């Protein structure tokens, strides 16, 4: 069948290349949001820091806790 492989292929996954989940507006829901990104079709995220001190440190913490 011509389209047989398309039926068994893994679903497409989004690669979010610019996010700021370290922002304080995510403080109450950050972990739940990041844990559920895969169910929403997001496979990977690059979380960009806004400075070399607080934001960069928070981004590293998030990356260690949520490796994707």
Image (cartoon, rainbow, N blue to C red):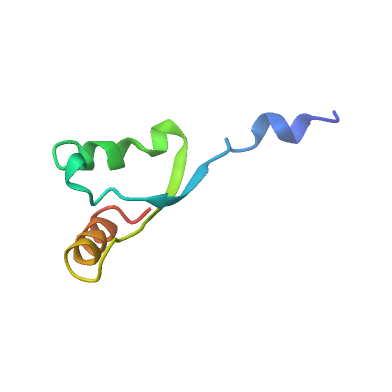
Q: Residue at x 57, y 35 (%)?
A: 11
Query: Horizontal and vertical percent for residue 8?
Result: 65, 33
The correct choice, above or below, for 43 with respect to 40 in the image is: below
Q: Nearer the viewer, residue 37 or 16?
A: 16
Query: Horizontal and vertical percent for residue 64?
Result: 25, 61
**Residue farthest left in this picture:** 28
Residue 11 in the figure: left or right of residue 51: right
**Residue farthest right in this picture:** 2
Query: Horizontal and vertical percent for residue 68?
Result: 38, 53
**Residue farthest front in this picture:** 51
Q: Residue at x 21, y 41 (%)?
A: 26
The correct choice, above or below, for 50 with respect to 9 in the image is: below
Q: Which quadrant of the structure image shows residue 7? A: top right
The N terminus lies in quadrant: top right
Q: Residue at x 42, y 52 (%)?
A: 18
Q: Which quadrant of the structure image shows residue 30? A: top left
Q: Nearer the viewer, residue 22 or 50?
A: 50
The correct choice, above or below, for 28 with respect to 67 in the image is: above
Q: Nearer the viewer, residue 28 or 31?
A: 28
How many labels, in total? 0
Residue 64 in the figure: left or right of residue 38: left
Q: Which quadrant of the structure image shows residue 62? A: bottom left
Query: Horizontal and vertical percent for residue 57?
Result: 20, 66
Q: Residue at x 32, y 35 (%)?
A: 36
């Amino acid at each position: 069948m011509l389209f047989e492989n398309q039926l068994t292929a893994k679903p497409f996954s989004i690669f979010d290349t610019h996010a700021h989940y370290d922002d304080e507006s995510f403080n109450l829901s950050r972990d739940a949001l990041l844990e559920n990104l895969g169910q929403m079709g997001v496979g990977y995220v690059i979380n960009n820091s806004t400075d070399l001190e607080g934001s960069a440190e928070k981004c590293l913490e998030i990356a260690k806790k949520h490796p994707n």
